[in-house]
C-alpha cells in the first residue's frame, strides 16, 4: 500500500457495525474467553486496540517491524536512551532539540552513561569521536534549529561497524518525507506532537524499530510494558485521525515554506536563511538523496538581536510560540524557548544565537503569511 492510502485507511478492519472510523476502546482490562485464553488484549498498559491500530500504521509508515505510541516525544527518546547501560557512551548531533540535551546531560549522566556531541553532518569528525564503548549514535536530520543534514546511510554503517545503534529523531520531516529505517537506521523517534498530529492539540511520541527480534527490540518491549509510558486511547484516536491528512498537510506546508524561504532571502533585514529546500543549502543534495521532501521548517537570522525580539511582539497572524509542525504557523525564538537550557558551548559551536528565529510554516494562505512577516520585519 502506498503512503497516501496507508495514511487514510491504516490497517483498519471493519467490526460488526461497519464503522469507517476506528473505534475508541476505553477499556482498561479485557475479558478472557477461558483459562489461558486471550483475545490478544489483556490489560490496557500492555495493549489497547485503538493504540494498536495506530502503532501498526506507524510501523508501516516508517517501514519498521514495530512501533509504540507513547505519551510524548521525550518519552520516546527516553525509551531509546534506556537501551544504554552504565559505562556505555552515546554520540549525539551537537545541534538538536534542547530537551534531548537536558535528558542526556542531567539525567543519563547520573546513571553512568557517557556522552559527546559532534557535528554529525561531518562524517570524519563523527568517526573520530567514536569510542569502543559507543553504543548509540543519535541524530536529527535536518537538525533543530540549524537545519544541518547528516548522512543517514553513512552514519548507520559507521555505527554498525562500531557495534552501535543508529537512532534518528525524524520529527522535522515525518515518515511522509523521510524513512530512516530504510536507509539503515535501527531506531526512529518522533515528537508526534508535531507533524504526525499536525493540529497543535495533543502531546504524543513514537518509537519505531527496524528489527523486533533483536536484543534492542526485545528490551524496548520489556521497558515499555514495564514502565507504562503509553499513549491514551483518545489521544491515539486523535493521532490516527490526524495521520489521514498527513500527506496533504506536509506537502501544502512545504509549498508555503519554499515560497517563504525564497522571500526571506530578498529581505534586507534578514542576514541568513536556513532551509534545506534552497539549492544553496550545503546539505541540499544529500538531503535529496535520503528524503522525498524538504519539509516546512525554516530558521533565519535577522540583522540585530533587538529586531529579533521586537518582531515577535509585532506578529498578528503567526503565533510566537514553542512547538512546530501544526497547521497553524508558529515562530519560535530558540535561544529563549526550545534551546534555553542548551550549554553555551553548544550554542557557540552551532551558531544558535540571539538573532535566530525558527519558523514552522503552516497551511494558511502564503500571501497572508508573507504579509505578516513583512510588517513585523520591516515595521
Ligand atoms: C525534534 C524534537 N524532538 C523531540 C521533541 C520532544 O517532543 P515532545 O514535546 O512531544 O515531548 C521535540 C519537541 O519540541 C522536538 O522538536
Image (cartoon, helix red, strand yellow):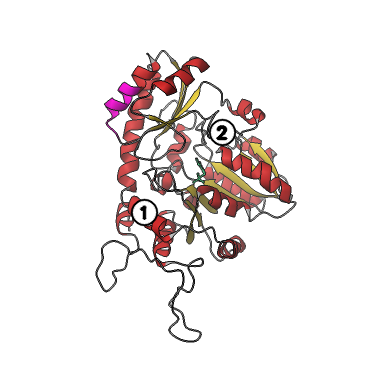
Q: Which mark is residue 238?
A: 1
Depth order, front residue of 118/96 = 96
**Residue 133 visible to an observer of this rendering:** no
Depth order, front residue of 184/373 = 373
For this view, does 371 lie left or right of residue 73? left
- Disc 1 crowd rating (10 Å Cα; few below 14, some 14-19, many 20+) is some
Compared to 123, does 202 lie above or below?
below
Counting residues from the start of the chain, the first of labels 2 and 1 encountered is: 1
- Disc 2 crowd rating (10 Å Cα; few below 14, some 14-19, many 20+) is many
User: Dot 1: what SS?
Assistant: helix
Q: Which residue is mark 2?
A: 339
User: Dot 2: what SS?
Assistant: loop
Image location of residue 155, percent across then percent down: 58, 44
Identify the residue at image location x=30%, y=44%: 248
**Residue 252 visible to an observer of this rendering:** yes
Looking at this rendering, what residue extends furthest in the bottom direction? 35
CA separation, marks 2 and 1?
28 Å
Depth order, front residue of 371/285 = 371
Compared to 311, does 326 lie above or below?
below
Identify the residue at image location x=65%, y=35%: 125
Question: Where is the N terminus found, in terms of image quarters?
Answer: bottom left
Residue 333 colored in magenta in the image: no
Label 2 within 8 A of ligand 1 by Cβ: no
Image location of residue 154, percent across then percent down: 56, 44
Label 1 within 8 A of ligand 1 by Cβ: no
Question: Where is the C terminus found, in terms of image quarters?
Answer: top left
Residue 368 colored in magenta in the image: yes
Compared to 37, does 130 lie above or below?
above
Image location of residue 334, percent across then percent down: 52, 30
Stretch of the chain drawn in magenta: 364-372
Amino acid at each position: 500500500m502506498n503512503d497516501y492510502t496507508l495514511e487514510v485507511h491504516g490497517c483498519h478492519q471493519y467490526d460488526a457495525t461497519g464503522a469507517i472510523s476506528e473505534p475508541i476502546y476505553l477499556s482498561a482490562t479485557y475479558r478472557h474467553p477461558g483459562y489461558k485464553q486471550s483475545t490478544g488484549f489483556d490489560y490496557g498498559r500492555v495493549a489497547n486496540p485503538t493504540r494498536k491500530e495506530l502503532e501498526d500504521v506507524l510501523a508501516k509508515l516508517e517501514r519498521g517491524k514495530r512501533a509504540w505510541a507513547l505519551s510524548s516525544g521525550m518519552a520516546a527518546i527516553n525509551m531509546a536512551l534506556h537501551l544504554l547501560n552504565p559505562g556505555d557512551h552515546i554520540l549525539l548531533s551537537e545541534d538538536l532539540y534542547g530537551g534531548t540535551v537536558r535528558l542526556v546531560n542531567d539525567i543519563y549522566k547520573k546513571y553512568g552513561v557517557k556522552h559527546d556531541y559532534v557535528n554529525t553532518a561531518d562524517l570524519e569528525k563523527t568517526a573520530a569521536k567514536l569510542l569502543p564503548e559507543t553504543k548509540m549514535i543519535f541524530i536529527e536530520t535536518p537538525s533543530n534549529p540549524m537545519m544541518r543534514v547528516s548522512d543517514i546511510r553513512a552514519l548507520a554503517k559507521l555505527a554498525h561497524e562500531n557495534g552501535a545503534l543508529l537512532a534518528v529523531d525524524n520529527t522535522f520531516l515525518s515518515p511522509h518525507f523521510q524513512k530512516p529505517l530504510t536507509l539503515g537506521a535501527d531506531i526512529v523517534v518522533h515528537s508526534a506532537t508535531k507533524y504526525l498530529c499536525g493540529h497543535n492539540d495533543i502531546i504524543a511520541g513514537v518509537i519505531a524499530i527496524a528489527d523486533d527480534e533483536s536484543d534492542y527490540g526485545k528490551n524496548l518491549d520489556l521497558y515499555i510494558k514495564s514502565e507504562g509510558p503509553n499513549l491514551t486511547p483518545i489521544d491515539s484516536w486523535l493521532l490516527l485521525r490526524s495521520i489521514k491528512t498527513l500527506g496533504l498537510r506536509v506537502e501544502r506546508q512545504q509549498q508555503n515554506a519554499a515560497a517563504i524561504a525564497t522571500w526571506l532571502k530578498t529581505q534586507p533585514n534578514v542576514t541568513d536563511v536556513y532551509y534545506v529546500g534552497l539549492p544553496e543549502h550545503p546539505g541540499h543534495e544529500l538531503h535529496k538523496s535520503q528524503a522525498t521532501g524538504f519539509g516546512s521548517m525554516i530558521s533565519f537570522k535577522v540583522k540585530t538581536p533587538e529586531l529579533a525580539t521586537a518582531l515577535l511582539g509585532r506578529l498578528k497572524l503567526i503565533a510566537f510560540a514553542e512547538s512546530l509542525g501544526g497547521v497553524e504557523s508558529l515562530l519560535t525564538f530558540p535561544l529563549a524557548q526550545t534551546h534555553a537550557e542548551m550549554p553555551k558551548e553548544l550554542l557557540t559551536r552551532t551558531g544558535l544565537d540571539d538573532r535566530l528565529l525558527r519558523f514552522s510554516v503552516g497551511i494558511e494562505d502564503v500571501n497572508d503569511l508573507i504579509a505578516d512577516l513583512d510588517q513585523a520585519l520591516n515595521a
